[in-house]
Amino acid sequence: MIEMCAIASGSNGNCYYVGNGDEAVLVDAGISRRQVLERMAQRNLNPAKVKAILISHEHADHFRGVRVLSKNLNVPVYITQKSYDKSWGPNRPDQVILFQPGEDIKVGGLLIHSFLKNHDAAEPCSFRIENNGLNVGVFTDIGAPCDNVTSQLAQCQALFLESNYDEDMLWAGSYPQHLKTRVAGDKGHLSNAQAFDLLKQHHHPDLKVVFLSHLSGENNRPEVAADAFKSLLTCFEIKVTNRYAVGEVYTIE
């Protein structure tokens, strides 16, 4: 079995739990230690099962809480050298294990497949987490889908997939032009439409559930994102993560 939970998901902070019942990893730590532990307690997730924290890249909404959280849990933080070098020094954790993009990481019974993606960070990675042939992908902060993303998606039974913005809301919104251009660029974020097209073209019969993730507070709404994917509901479950609260614990066996 493999279980998953969005502890936090949005441009205001990200943290994802993936485990096999005995051990787990967290992907990113963009909220405080207190928030992570409180939200895990709300879903009866035991922090003692967390054996590592994986950092996708150095931006604050994925990194700001990692130093205190890793110290509290006494677990190592896996991060690439370039991401570590570009990170804000006071947030850098004490227990660091460096990995190369594309390297597989073994944490107990979990096998983590790392891969590069398109984003405006030093060395941005996403992860596919495997347990006994069951796979959960955590794919956020993707400006444009690349071959790495599509090939890894093909192996996932569950997926946290970025659906950051609605294009009309972004271009009509209050962001300055340079920020709109950055968000919509090939190294920015996936829109609802881009994420839909990715899934429409590359979903497969083994894909059971997709969690729409990393929604913008300014340029998206949960109901807008959900509506964009409704034609795929006959193919797999679609759920929307919450920017302000922990999600459900979802299990695949």
Image: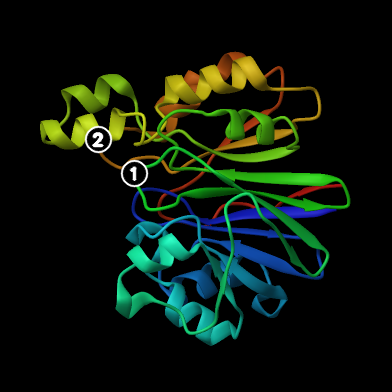
Identify the element where label 2 is drawn.
helix
Question: Would you place residue 166 above or below residue 76 in this image?
Answer: above
Residue 27 x/y as whole percent = 56, 59
- Label 2 sits on what residue type? Arg
* Front residue of 94 and 35: 94
Left or right? Give the position of 38 relative to 191: right
Q: CA distance from mark 1 to mark 2?
A: 9 Å
Residue 195 x/y as whole percent = 50, 26
Look at 67% across and 36% down and name the residue there: 152
In the rendering, which numbered label is found on residue 169?
none
Identify the element where label 1 is drawn.
loop
- Callout 2 crowding tier (Cα within 10 Å): few <14, some 14–19, many ≥20: some
Residue 22 x/y as whole percent = 82, 70
Q: Quadrant of residue 161?
A: top right
Look at 21% across and 29% down and name the residue there: 181
Labels 1 and 2 touching (C-beta < 8 A): yes
- Callout 1 crowding tier (Cα within 10 Å): few <14, some 14–19, many ≥20: some
Q: Can you identify the residue that label 1 sits on?
A: 120
Q: Can you identify the residue that label 2 sits on?
A: 182
Q: Quadrant of residue 98?
A: bottom right
Residue 21 x/y as whole percent = 81, 65
* Front residue of 241 and 150: 150
Question: Is residue 147 among what the camera can see?
Answer: yes
Look at 29% across and 34% down and name the residue there: 183
Mark with earlier residue (1, 2): 1
- Label 1 sits on what residue type? Asp
Look at 78% across and 61% down and name the residue there: 110
Left or right? Give the position of 18 relative to 14: right
Question: Would you place residue 203 above or below residue 12 in this image?
Answer: above
Eye-nearest disc, 1 or 2: 1
